[in-house]
Image (cartoon, rainbow, N blue to C red):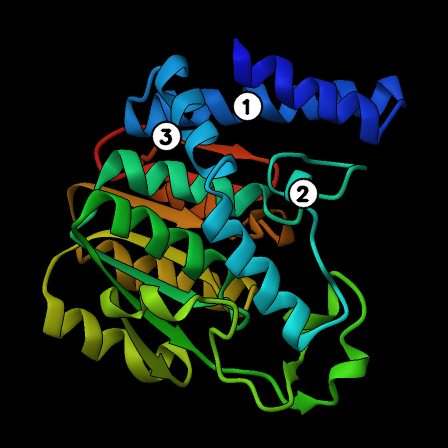
Amino acid sequence: MYRDVKVWLQRATECRNPLILAQAFNYDQNRLAMLQDCVALPSRDSKKLLMEIEEDTDFIRDVQRKLSRYTQYSPRAVDFMLFGHSGSVFFNEVTLYVIVRSFKPKIMVETGGTPGKSTAFILRAMERNQCGHLYTIDLPPGKVNNTQLNTIESYHEFMPSGALSGWAVPEYLHERHTQLIGTSREHLPSLLEQLRDIDMFLHDSDHSYENMTWEFETAYSALGREGLLLSDDILANDAFSDFCTSKGLAFRNVYNLGAARSNTC
């Protein structure tokens, strides 16, 4: 209850449009339903973990500093708990944090995500779990002058001058992280052959229908019976829903983040 009151007071301060506030409430409810169905996490436990990351001031400050160093975008603390007009570009990342904290994957693979926002939240969850290793396959975009990175969206499309792939990840989280530079077609098959079994896969690279379908097919063969298949930007096309339907997988989504369990969801 405390978190609900705190979040909604901040939302009301940030945005007085009742339609947008209603939309934010709907996203919250969808997220709780996804967590219940896909990782069997009751709402009360989901809210505890949401509060845990929202109040992780040291970690949030470190991410803020990283973004401020390389771009002209400096997120506020409230941005880590809001969605919609108030501007949370971290809604999916916070959701991923809760999923990883609850699911406790030993081996996770992700594709894409040059800034490393999702990577940072996943690694923070693994650090809290005291278990897990994340493998990231990423093909960074071209580098540009930092002054061009002045919008929320632009740092996904370009690499800040002097930065490396995953530049938003705090240094102290690198211990549980292995990064492979290149395309998923270059690295994913051999990585999965090396790992044999994985617990969780997250797609966030090239969002073409063909590439998404190929990554889902390739990763699915390595997911265990209880494995979790995740995808960002599922609204870009029907690849995620088509794949889940073809495999008989029930799936849930909250906005553009989709989740499906190997056995059920």
Image: 103 above or below 264: below
Would residue 245 be seen by someone viewing this image from the given angle?
no
Q: Is residue 24 visible?
A: yes
Which of the pair 157/230 is nearer the observer? 157
**Secondary-structure class at tag 3:** loop
Categorize mark 1 by other alpha carbons within 10 Å: few (<14), some (14-19), many (20+): some
**Tag 2 and tag 3, C-beta contact below 8 Å:** no
10 Å crowding of disc 2: few (<14), some (14-19), many (20+):
some
Left/right placement of residue 250 relative to residue 76 reads: left
Decide: is 71 above or below 7: below
Which marked residue is nearer to the observer: mark 2 or mark 3?
Answer: 2
Q: Position of residue 67 (x, y in %)?
A: 63, 66
> Considering the numbered disc 1 on the image, is that residue within a helix, a strand or a loop?
helix
Tell me the quarter of the image containing the C terminus.
Answer: top left
Q: Which residue is mark 1?
A: 30
Q: Measuring 61% from the left and 35% from the top, which residue is drawn there?
A: 81
Residue bearing the label numbered 2: 79
Residue with the mark numbered 3: 250
